[in-house]
Amino acid sequence: MAGLLLTPLNPHSLSNRPLVIADDKTVLVEAYTPQDFYSLTVDGQRVAKVESGRGVLVKRAKNDACLVNFAGRYFYDVLRQKLGWGDIQEGRGNTK
């Protein structure tokens, strides 16, 4: 499934959620801060200082990203195993 995911960093409200948009759209992101500049972070890397009130256009790259998929190893299965999700603990759950 192709798409763009825009995620606010350090939101101060639970209503600020990631935004998924169609991959053929272009988004103008603007930030207004009391400071003269704000930091632009892309994929966890600080890439630029942008003047307050100036916008940044976000669009899909020409090339696709290649992701690694390990056969038989799924993200949520690993979490369940490492965090013990779904395990029945002594003294909890149904007792028969």
Image (cartoon, rainbow, N blue to C red):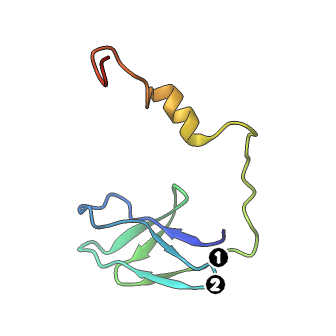
Q: CA distance from mark 1 to mark 2?
A: 7 Å
Q: Residue at x 56, y 85 (%)?
A: 26
Q: Residue at x 38, y 60 (%)?
A: 9
Q: Is residue 16 left or right of residue 26?
A: left
- Where does residue 20 sit, x and y in percent of width and height? 50, 72
- Where does residue 92 sit, x and y in percent of width and height? 28, 21
Amino acid beneath label 1 = Arg
Q: Check whether the beta carbons of the residues at disc 1 and disc 2 lie within 8 A of each other.
A: yes
Q: Secondary structure at mark 2?
A: loop
Q: Nearer the viewer, residue 31 or 23?
A: 23
- Where does residue 53 sit, x and y in percent of width and height? 35, 84
Q: Is residue 43 left or right of residue 19?
A: right
| Corner quadrant of residue 94 | top left
| Corner quadrant of residue 61 | bottom right
Which part of the image, by quadrant, shows the C terminus?
A: top left
**For marks 1 and 2 on the same chain, the one whose residue lies earlier in the sequence:** 2
- Residue wearing tag 2: 24
Q: Nearer the viewer, residue 7 or 95?
A: 95
Q: How many marks?
A: 2
Q: Residue at x 27, y 74 (%)?
A: 33
Mark 1, other Cα within 10 Å: few <14 / some 14–19 / many ≥20: some
Q: Nearer the viewer, residue 7 or 41?
A: 7
- Residue wearing tag 1: 60
| For residue 52, above or below residue 17 | below
